[in-house]
Image: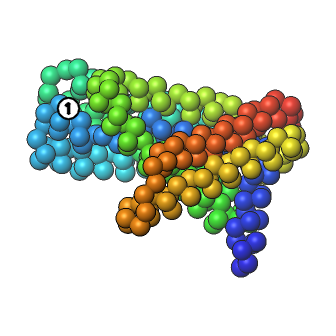
Amino acid sequence: KTLEQAVVAPLRDFFGRNNAWLILLLIVLYKLGDAFAMSLTTTFLIRGVGFDAGEVGVVNKTLGLLATIVGALYGGILMQRLSLFRALLIFGILQGASNAGYWLLSITDKHLYSMGAAVFFENLCGGMGTSAFVALLMTLCNKSFSATQFALLSALSAVGRVYVGPVAGWFVEAHGWSTFYLFSVAAAVPGLILLLVCRQTLEYTRVNDNFISRTEYPAGYAFAMWTLAAGVSLLAVWLLLLTMDALDLTHFSFLPALLEVGVLVALSGVVLGGLLDYLALRKTHLT
C-alpha cells in the first residue's frame, strides 16, 4: 500500500465525521478515572496503607488479574443483551464508583480482606469497562480502514494511562491518599458526560453501520486541525531537544516552557474541535 492508502485516507475518513473530535476526547477520558486509581495502587497499598510486599503481590497482582479476566468475560456476556451505549454508560459508572474502595482503605484500619475486596471489585469493574471500550473502538473503525484506525484509536487510548502517573504522584504529595482516590472517582465523570453527548451518533452508527459526514464549520475545523498540528510539532521539537540534552550534546534552558506551550497549543486544537463537534451535533437531525 502507498502512504496515502495506509495513513492519509484512514485519517481523512475519520476526521471527516461530524463527531471525530468528541470521540477523540471520549477515548482519552473514558477510562481516565480508572487510570488514576491504577497508577499508584501498589505504592498506595504498601506505603499508604502499610501492607507488606508479599501480601500486595498475591492480592493485587494475582487476584487483580483474575478479577480483570472475569470482568472482561462477564462484560462481554452482558453486552449481548445491552446496546453499546448502555454498556459503556453502566460499566463506566461502575468502574468509576469502584475506585471508592481504595478511598475506604485509606480511611479505615488495615485488613487483608478489605484490601482483597477493594482490589477484586475495582479490577472486576475495570475489566467490564475494558470490554465495552474495545467494542467502542471496533465500532468506530471503518471496515475499509480498520487496521490503521484501530491502531490510531488504541494508541490514543493509552495517552491517559501513560501521562497520569506524574500528575498522580504530585496530587498525592499535595493532598494525600484519601483525597486522591475521591478525585479518581470524579475523574470518571467527564468521560461519562462526553458519552451522553455522543449518544445519538453512536446509536446511529450501531443501527446503520455507517458514519455521519461533517458538513458544518469547515474553516473552524481546519483551524483546529492546524492548531493541533502546530502543538504536536512543538512537542516533537521538545522531545528532540530533550534527547539531545540527555545525551549531553547541548543544553537548553527553555525546555520546560516549550513543553508547556506545546501541550497548551495541542489541547487548544482538540478542545476547539470538540466544541465545533458539539455545535454541529446540535444542528444534526438523525433519522
Q: Is residue 284 visible?
A: yes
Q: Residues within 10 Å of mark 1 (few under 14, many from 20)?
A: some
Residue 200 x, y percent position in the rendering? 74, 35
Q: Secondary structure at mark 1?
A: helix
Residue 183 x, y percent position in the rendering? 41, 26
Occupied quadrant, residue 279: top right
Q: Is residue 123 visible?
A: no
Image: 6 above or below 196: below
Residue 138 x, y percent position in the rendering? 62, 55
Q: Would residue 282 be found to the left or right of residue 138 on screen? A: right
The amino acid pointed to by label 1 is Gly
Q: How many marks?
A: 1
Q: Residue at x 63, y 45 (%)?
A: 266
- Extreme bottom residue here? 1
Q: Residue at x 63, y 34 (%)?
A: 195
Residue 141 x, y percent position in the rendering? 68, 57
Q: Would residue 50 be found to the left or right of residue 99 on screen? A: left
Query: Which residue, given by chain and number where applicable, does mark 1 sit on?
Result: 48
Occupied quadrant, residue 46: top left
Q: Nearer the viewer, residue 68 or 284?
A: 284
Q: Would residue 152 be found to the left or right of residue 67 on screen? A: right
Q: Residue at x 56, y 30 (%)?
A: 190
Q: Nearer the viewer, residue 136 or 103?
A: 103
Image: 266 above or below 241: above
Q: What colouring method underlies this structural image?
A: rainbow
Q: Nearer the viewer, residue 218 or 84?
A: 218
Instruction: Check the picture and name the quadrant holding the N terminus.
Output: bottom right
Instruction: Check the picture and name the quadrant holding the C terminus.
Output: top right
Q: Residue at x 30, y 50 (%)?
A: 65
Occupied quadrant, residue 182: top left
